Image (cartoon, rainbow, N blue to C red):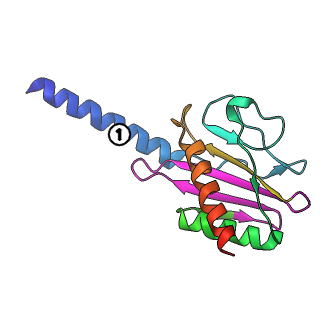
């Protein structure tokens, strides 16, 4: 019985620690730097499509056909349907936050519209921790699929 109580207490302490981390996590200094999304840090909890990104963090940008405004609007609708909340928006920049269900960890996704190519560069990163167990990459893959479906419908 004593061992059981110790294990329960330890599990509770770990849960409280993760909750504390998620509550105290500060929003990143997001935004464009010299017209580009910030590079990923060395930690494996970030992916980006901007050139100069290390292979381990690299993902392809979103491509689209049709007017850039339509793609931008479909992107926002798709992100909202996935549970994203818009934090900041400019004509060619979008910052969206996603919150995990259990520990309420926040991940930030940023987007940069390149109308002339036509591409949407993206960056997805966790606010806390070292590894995200591939969550950001999976979210980008899911977004890519849903965005392509939305663009085909229009």
Residue nearest the viewer, comparing 151 with 122:
151
Q: Residue at x 59, y 61 (%)?
A: 146
From the top left corner, tell me how far across and down residue 65 is, in percent.
80, 65
Q: Main secondary structure of the magenta part?
A: strand
In this rendering, the answer to whether 7 lies above or below 87 is above
Q: Residue at x 90, y 47 (%)?
A: 34
Q: State the residue lying farthest toward the front.
A: 152
From the top left corner, tell me how far across and down residue 91 is, in percent.
83, 68
> Is residue 93 found inside the magenta-colored segment of the image?
yes
From the top left corner, tell me how far across and down residue 151 is, in percent.
69, 68
Q: Secondary structure at mark 1?
A: helix
The residue carrying pointer 1 sits among few (fewer than 14), some (14 to 19) or many (20 or more) residues within 10 Å by Cα, namely some
* Residue at image mark 1: 15
Quarter of the figure with the N terminus: top left
Q: State the residue lying farthest toward the bottom.
A: 154
Q: State the residue lying farthest toward the top.
A: 3
Q: Residue at x 48, y 41 (%)?
A: 21
**Is residue 13 rendered to the left or right of residue 35?**
left
Which segment did they paint magenta?
Answer: 88-117
Quarter of the figure with the C terminus: bottom right
> Is residue 54 found inside the magenta-colored segment of the image?
no
Residue nearest the viewer, comparing 62 with 109:
62
From the top left corner, tell me how far across and down residue 56 is, in percent.
68, 30
Q: Quadrant of residue 25?
A: top right
């Amino acid at each position: 019985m004593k061992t059981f109580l110790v294990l329960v207490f330890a599990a509770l302490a770990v849960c409280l620690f993760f909750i504390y981390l998620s509550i105290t996590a500060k929003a990143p200094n997001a935004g464009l730097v010299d017209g580009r999304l910030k590079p990923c840090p060395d930690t494996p909890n970030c992916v980006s499509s901007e050139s100069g990104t290390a292979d381990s963090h690299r993902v392809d940008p979103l491509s689209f056909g049709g007017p850039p405004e339509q793609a931008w609007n479909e992107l926002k609708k798709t992100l909202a349907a996935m549970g994203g909340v818009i934090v900041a928006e400019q004509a060619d920049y979008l910052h969206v936050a996603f919150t995990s269900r259990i520990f309420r960890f926040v991940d930030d996704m940023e987007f940069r519209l390149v109308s002339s190519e036509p591409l949407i560069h993206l960056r997805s990163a966790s606010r806390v921790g070292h590894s995200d167990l591939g969550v950001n990459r999976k979210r980008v893959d899911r977004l890519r699929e849903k965005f392509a479906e939305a663009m085909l419908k229009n």
